[in-house]
Image (spheres, rainbow, N blue to C red):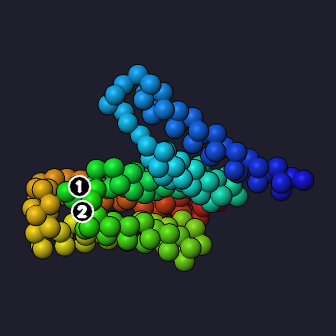
Amino acid sequence: MNKERNLIHSIAYPAVATGLILLIPLIAMQFSNEVVWTLSDFVIAGTLLFGTGLTYTLITRKSGEIAYRLAIGFALFTGLFLIWVNMAVGIIGSENNDINLLYFLVIFTGIGGGFISQFKPKGLMITLFAMAGVQALIAVAALLTGMGDAQGSSVYEILVVNGFFITLFVVAASLFRYADQDQADK
């Protein structure tokens, strides 16, 4: 009975949060012509938000460590934000630019690293540094091949946007380092 209740809570909290967040664009559409979401926009956003929330809940449910929970949340938010920006407007050029598909390698690096490390703080720290490295490699590849200029993104834009995400991944890695040290001290 207790396991069933925990499973229901694991699903209910992210579902309710997702519904509340999706109310924002739904309400905005009623008052502004500038917010125009299609059904597919709601489905994709709902899937991303619910999936991120459920992942957070499932990974952190057995850990009472605040530092670990914060690190997981920050890392998941950064990954979600990367996907959201990439799908909405694109990182390099528009969202239709094929080079933007490479940014999913950053996410796959995180997923793979999470499972390989069994979601332990030290392994996740390494994973987040690897994600920052993959992000940097994509930016360098875009700059060296001229993909940015060809798609309407300046060198400055590529460096700033990618640098922003690299910084977020490094901060998340640092939070996992802190969580690992916090666990070792106990």
Residue 112 position within the rendered picture, expressed as x and y whole percent measured from the top left = 50, 74
Residue at left 27%, top 59%? 96
Residue 137, located in which quarter of the rendered image? bottom left
Residue at left 36%, top 25%? 32
Residue 97: which numbered mark, if any?
Answer: 2
Seen in the picture, residue 27 relative to 172 is either above or below; the reply is: above
Q: Is residue 44 visible?
A: yes
Residue 94: which numbered mark, if any?
Answer: 1
Residue at left 35%, top 54%? 87
Seen in the picture, residue 107 relative to 41 is either above or below; the reply is: below
Q: Foreground: 34 or 147?
A: 34
- Does residue 25 appear to the left or right of 14 in the view shown? left
- Does residue 183 appear to the left or right of 80 in the view shown? right
Residue 182 position within the rendered picture, expressed as x and y whole percent measured from the top left = 56, 58
**In contact (CB < 8 Å): disc 2 and disc 1:** yes
Kindly report the distance in space between the C-alpha atoms of the residues bearing marks 2 and 1. Answer: 6 Å
Q: Secondary structure at mark 2?
A: loop
Specify the amino acid type for callout 1.
Ser
Q: Is residue 45 visible?
A: no
Q: Foreground: 111 or 30?
A: 30
Residue 165, located in which quarter of the rendered image? bottom left
Specify the amino acid type for callout 2.
Asn
